[in-house]
């Protein structure tokens, strides 16, 4: 089997059903993630990492085009906008998500004219006529795509030469201790809260399983290199999500360099 293609079924759901399940929980999703005290902080961490790279790559550009892929209800978009404004940058931000329900939640927030939202799958990025991006943020997205390598290649094609990609993603493939910790948190906390807050836990069981089944971060870095990215670097976060949640940086430029830790 081509490992670039994700399994059709992960846990209780097929990949094609995931966007619809996000539609079902869209009105309670922010409440769920708000119960995780680190969620907003980690989104801001990723946003700041992208802006660091954007400024380093194009220091004279004050109004870059940024794509927020898998933007969901707009929490990552808000983190990216706030990070940019604090630096005196006025970006054009395009939030992209496959769930119409989550995008409806995003559009209910107040946004400046430079922010827009588009209903599309990440796998369709090259078909939608987006402007060349000065940076891409992809939080909690890649383990949900149906063809990982094709998606990475489309991300590369969407970026200007030398422009950065920042990925924030879960993976426990490289740490047995992290896998046990992830299992315990889901069993004792996330699944019961999902039943209480969202009235169902099917999507959250899928998200739990999708982390268990996702590739390791070293392999993801290798796949980024094969897709044409260079200057690869990655690290994990601190706290209980150490070796569970990871931040990766790369650039759409030149031959792949060594992966840094």
Image: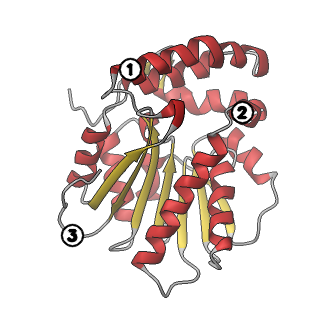
Inter-mark Cα distance, 2 to 3: 39 Å
Which disc number belongs to residue 254? 3
* Residue located at (45% from left, 55% from top): 125
Inter-mark Cα distance, 1 to 3: 36 Å
Rendered location of residue 143, percent (x, y): 42, 35
Residue at the spot of label 2? 29
Q: Secondary structure at mark 1?
A: helix
Whether tag 1 and tag 3 are in contact, CB under 8 A, the answer is no
Pointer 3 local density, CA inside 10 Å: few below 14, some 14–19, many at least 20? few
Q: Secondary structure at mark 2?
A: helix
* Residue located at (69% from left, 12% from top): 192
Q: Is residue 159 above or below residue 216?
A: below
Observer able to see residue 18: yes
Pointer 2 local density, CA inside 10 Å: few below 14, some 14–19, many at least 20? some
Q: Earlier in the sequence, mark 1 or mark 3?
A: 1
Rendered location of residue 199, percent (x, y): 76, 16
Pointer 1 local density, CA inside 10 Å: few below 14, some 14–19, many at least 20? few
């Amino acid at each position: 089997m081509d490992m670039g293609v994700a399994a059709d079924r992960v846990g209780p759901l097929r990949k094609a059903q995931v966007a619809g399940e996000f539609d079902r929980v869209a009105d309670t999703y922010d409440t769920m993630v708000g119960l995780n005290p680190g969620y907003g902080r980690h989104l801001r961490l990723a946003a700041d990492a992208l802006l660091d790279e954007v400024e380093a790559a194009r220091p004279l550009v004050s109004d870059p085009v940024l794509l927020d892929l898998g933007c969901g209800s707009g929490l990552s978009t808000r983190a990216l906008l706030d990070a940019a404004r604090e630096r005196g940058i006025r970006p054009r931000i395009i939030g992209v998500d496959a769930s119409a329900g989550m995008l409806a939640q995003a559009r209910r927030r107040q946004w400046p004219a430079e922010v827009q939202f588009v209903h599309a799958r990440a796998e369709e990025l090259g078909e939608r006529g987006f402007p060349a991006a000065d940076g891409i943020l992809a939080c909690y997205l890649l383990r949900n795509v149906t063809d990982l390598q094709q998606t990475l290649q489309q991300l590369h094609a969407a970026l200007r030469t030398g422009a950065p990609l920042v990925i924030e993603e879960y993976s426990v493939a490289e740490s047995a201790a992290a896998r046990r910790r992830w299992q315990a948190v889901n069993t004792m906390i996330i699944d019961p809260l999902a039943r209480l807050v969202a009235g169902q836990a099917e999507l959250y069981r899928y998200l739990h399983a999708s982390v268990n089944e996702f590739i390791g971060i070293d392999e993801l870095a290798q796949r980024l290199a094969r897709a044409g990215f260079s200057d690869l670097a990655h690290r994990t976060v601190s706290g209980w999500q150490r070796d569970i949640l990871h931040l990766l940086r790369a650039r759409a430029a030149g031959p792949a360099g060594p992966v840094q830790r």
